[in-house]
């Protein structure tokens, strides 16, 4: 690669990163704007963060989102970890079918899963609400947890478990005292992924939510269809910061593992 | 059979049972909340709309099955819906193409840049991607408004006499979709370009190949798995996309995703929506099969 070429590429990449970040930076900057219509920059204020904090609907949506995310993460992590153990270590009849079932949500358009779940709940006459959202979130999180935990199990040294057994530990004690602590970083990384996927999900939630069960993405979507005030910018800013902190910690967790 | 053989078999059986026990909760969950809903959609697509509800299941299952038909699929052949399908294919194709053209040079640079910069740049590539996608759409809604920053800048620079109407046009949808899905393109491209052995390019150059020719004959073919992986990772979600056109496209830009969503949540004609989603699935599966055929299994998805 000649220098002229590589300089051109460097400039192009620089512009690309500018393009990537400019919209978000503008969005964050305008959350501090005094002007209600948020068209031009008028002056600095924290007013919209006060409005955000006082907004009862945002509070309720946040609580719903967290409740769904916590419940679905715990359930999906437990189920997904067991599935990962099964697929990584055992030979059994349902193996191929299980692998395929766990691969499907990753490759089909989310909207198809969304309408499928909506049809399922309607057919069974289950009314839509936080429960249906949570059940659906568990369904799309399990494959991702299984994927992450399997990756960690891949390089697992089984002689440690054999040593525990040789020293008289039974299978349950071996699992709790040896296997689980060793794969815990992987399990936590999987849980973190499930948590983020749940917090972030719009499409599946859009089809499985019901009256009174508004999550944050659903609430934001409603706002974007109507009038937009800098409160949405303030909400977005808080959200982006929260995700960044979460990502930072999960990266730390991962780097500690390797 | 020897005692030893029997013992081995017993052990194998025991392990198979343990494995089945471990997979069972996950498998049941996937069957109930994924496989059955998908089968339901397939069956639904051959059904018909009810007089009072979104679906008429008939009084007995037997009645439903005897009345199943291809009517919904025939309806999709209406020029109106063929138009929607064509628009989706074109927009998804264009989005994918633009992502490829923009993403390739960036991925190439990332694969060549010094290691200490590379991890930082890769991290910075992912940060916007972790931001909720509604927020990313909103950022572009702010920028592209008639009074938004893009128009203001263009007017101040004297490039246009008056603000352009960008919002609620197909262009707005394209701009936002390219922004949403670019990381999906850059990451697999980076993975395959990074694996490329520089010695191959040196060899080409030693044999008097000009840089452009080396690129076309060496780099590009070897990065093809990344190109295909990126293409599919961008193409699948853009085909099913309904949120961006909904918020930024106005009434004129309807994609298959919008068609499906409206049938389920507004028009309440679920069987027709199910049929439309089957077409969407067929296109997606065809793309995925192509991908797995050409590039091996999921290898390029892992960074």
Image (cartoon, coloured by chain):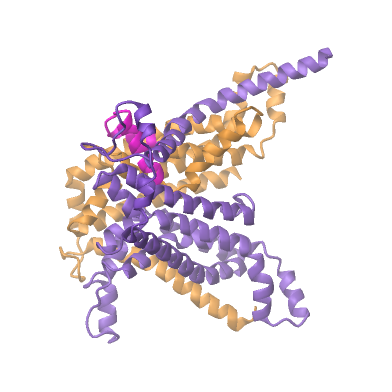
Q: Quadrant of the C terminus of chain B?
A: bottom right
Coordinates of residue B137 in the picture (x, y in percent): 32, 60
Coordinates of residue B231 in the picture (x, y in percent): 52, 61
In the rendered image, the vertical position of residue B86 relative to residue B9, given as above or below: below
User: At x 59% / y 69%, what residue is drawn?
Assistant: B113
Task: Tally the numbered discs.
Answer: 0
User: Residue at the top extreme?
Assistant: B3
Of residue B186 and residue A11, the one placed in the foreground of this image is B186
Of residue B226 and residue A253, the one placed in the foreground of this image is B226
Quadrant position of residue B105: bottom right
Range of residues picked out in magenta: A112-137
Coordinates of residue B8 in the picture (x, y in percent): 77, 19
Tell me, what hue is chain B?
Answer: purple
Residue A240 can be seen in this image? no
User: Residue at the left extreme?
Assistant: A36
In the picture provided, is B210 more to the left or to the right than A252?
right
Residue A76 on the magenta span: no
User: At x 54% / y 52%, what residue is drawn?
Assistant: B288
Residue B287 can be seen in this image? yes
Q: Main secondary structure of the magenta part?
A: helix
In the picture provided, is A109 more to the left or to the right than A34?
right
Q: Which chain is assigned orange?
A: A
Of residue B50 and residue B166, the one placed in the foreground of this image is B50
In the rendered image, the vertical position of residue A55 relative to residue A125, given as above or below: below
């Amino acid at each position: 690669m000649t220098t002229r070429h590589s300089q051109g590429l460097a400039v192009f990449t620089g512009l690309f990163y500018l393009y990537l970040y400019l919209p978000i930076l503008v969005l964050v900057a305008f959350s501090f704007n005094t002007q209600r219509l948020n068209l031009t920059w008028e002056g600095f204020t924290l007013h919209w963060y006060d409005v955000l904090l006082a907004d009862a609907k945002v509070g309720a949506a946040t609580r719903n989102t967290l409740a769904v995310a916590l419940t679905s993460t715990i359930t999906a992590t437990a189920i997904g970890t067991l599935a990962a153990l099964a697929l990584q270590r055992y030979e059994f009849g349902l193996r191929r079918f299980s692998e395929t079932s766990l691969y499907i949500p990753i490759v089909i358009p989310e909207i198809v899963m969304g309408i499928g779940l909506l049809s399922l709940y309607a057919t069974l006459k289950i009314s839509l609400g936080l429960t249906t959202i949570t059940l659906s979130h568990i369904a799309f999180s399990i494959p991702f947890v299984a994927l992450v935990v399997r990756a960690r199990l891949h390089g697992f040294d089984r002689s440690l478990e054999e040593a525990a057994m040789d020293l008289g530990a039974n299978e349950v004690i071996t699992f709790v005292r040896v296997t689980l602590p060793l794969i815990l970083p992987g399990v936590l990384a999987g849980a973190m992924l499930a948590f983020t996927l749940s917090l972030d999900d719009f499409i599946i939630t859009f089809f499985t939510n019901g009256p009174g069960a508004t999550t944050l993405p659903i609430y934001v979507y409603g706002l974007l269809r109507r009038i937009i005030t800098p409160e949405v910018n303030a909400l977005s800013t808080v959200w982006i910061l929260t995700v960044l902190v979460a990502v930072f910690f999960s990266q730390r967790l991962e780097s500690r593992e390797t | 059979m020897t005692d030893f053989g029997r013992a081995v078999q017993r052990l194998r059986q025991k392990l198979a049972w343990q494995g089945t026990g471990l997979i069972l909760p996950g498998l049941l969950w996937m069957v109930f909340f994924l496989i059955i809903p998908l089968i339901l959609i397939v069956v639904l697509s051959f059904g018909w709309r009810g007089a009072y509800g979104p679906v008429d299941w008939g009084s007995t299952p037997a009645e439903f099955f005897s009345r199943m038909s291809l009517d919904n699929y025939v309806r999709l052949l209406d020029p109106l819906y063929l138009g929607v399908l064509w628009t989706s294919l074109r927009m998804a194709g264009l989005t994918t193409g633009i992502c490829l053209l923009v993403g390739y040079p960036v991925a190439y640079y990332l694969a060549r840049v010094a290691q200490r910069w590379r991890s930082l740049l890769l991290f910075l590539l992912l940060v916007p991607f972790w931001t909720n996608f509604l927020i990313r759409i909103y950022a572009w809604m702010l920028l592209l408004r008639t009074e938004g920053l893009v128009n203001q800048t263009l007017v101040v620079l004297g490039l246009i006499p008056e603000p352009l109407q960008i919002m609620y046009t197909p262009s707005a949808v394209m701009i936002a979709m390219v922004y949403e899905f670019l990381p999906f393109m850059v990451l697999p491209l980076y993975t395959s370009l990074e694996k490329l052995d520089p010695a191959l390019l040196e060899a080409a150059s030693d044999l008097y190949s000009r840089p452009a020719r080396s690129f076309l004959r060496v780099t590009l073919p070897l990065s093809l798995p990344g190109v295909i992986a990126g293409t599919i990772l961008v193409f699948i979600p853009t085909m099913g996309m309904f949120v961006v056109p909904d918020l930024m496209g106005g009434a004129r830009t309807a994609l298959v995703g919008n068609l499906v969503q409206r049938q389920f949540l507004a028009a309440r004609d679920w069987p027709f929506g199910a049929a439309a989603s089957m077409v969407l699935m067929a296109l997606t599966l065809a793309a995925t099969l192509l991908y797995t055929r050409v590039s091996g299994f999921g290898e390029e998805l892992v960074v």
